[in-house]
Image (cartoon, rainbow, N blue to C red):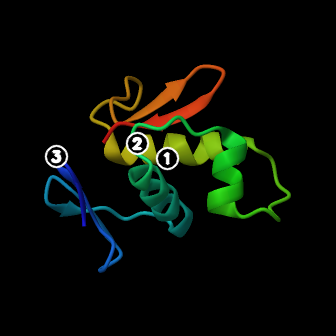
Amino acid sequence: MLVFGSLVLDLSRHEIRLNDQPLALKPKEYELLVYFAQHRGIVLSRDHILENVWGWDYTGDSRTVDVHIRWLREKIELDPSIPTRLITVRGAGYRFEG
């Protein structure tokens, strides 16, 4: 189990809870959030995320990462326009702060 204040990732149950309420995440959103949580505080580039979450054989657009980040922020941030958990690091990628 990974706990970040009110955000709880129960990996054994494959469940995410926020403020003790279950979050309905799409499979790739779940995988992405778990990957970020396991690499808390580390800046991850789009290419790194694509390779490790989508797989090395993914042939789509790298902007899919941005779209999934936006969807995650809408679900885990108090104010998605001012994120405190999932931070954009300009020119480098994204960093999960919990």
Q: Looking at this rendering, what residue extends furthest in the bottom direction? A: 13
- The amino acid beneath tag 1 is Trp
Q: Residue at x 51, y 27 (%)?
A: 88
Which residue is depicted at the point 39% across and 32% down? 80
Query: Which secondary structure lies at badge 3?
Result: loop
Q: Earlier in the sequence, mark 3 or mark 2?
A: 3
Q: Of the residues shown, which amino acid type is indicated by label 3? A: Gly
Q: Position of residue 37 (x, y in %)?
A: 39, 52
Viewer-closest of 60 and 2: 2
Q: CA distance from mark 1 to mark 2?
A: 5 Å
Tag 2 residue: 74
Q: CA distance from mark 3 to mark 1?
A: 20 Å
In the rendered image, the quadrant that contains the N terminus is: bottom left
Q: Position of residue 17 (x, y in %)?
A: 24, 61
**Within 10 Å of the Cα at label 3, are there few (<14), some (14-19), or many (20+) other Cα atoms?**
few
Evaluate if marks 3 and 2 touch, with contact meaning CB atoms under 8 Å apart. Answer: no
Q: Which mark is residue 5?
A: 3
> What residue is shown at x 64% (from left), y 38% (from top)?
45
The residue to which callout 1 is attached is 71
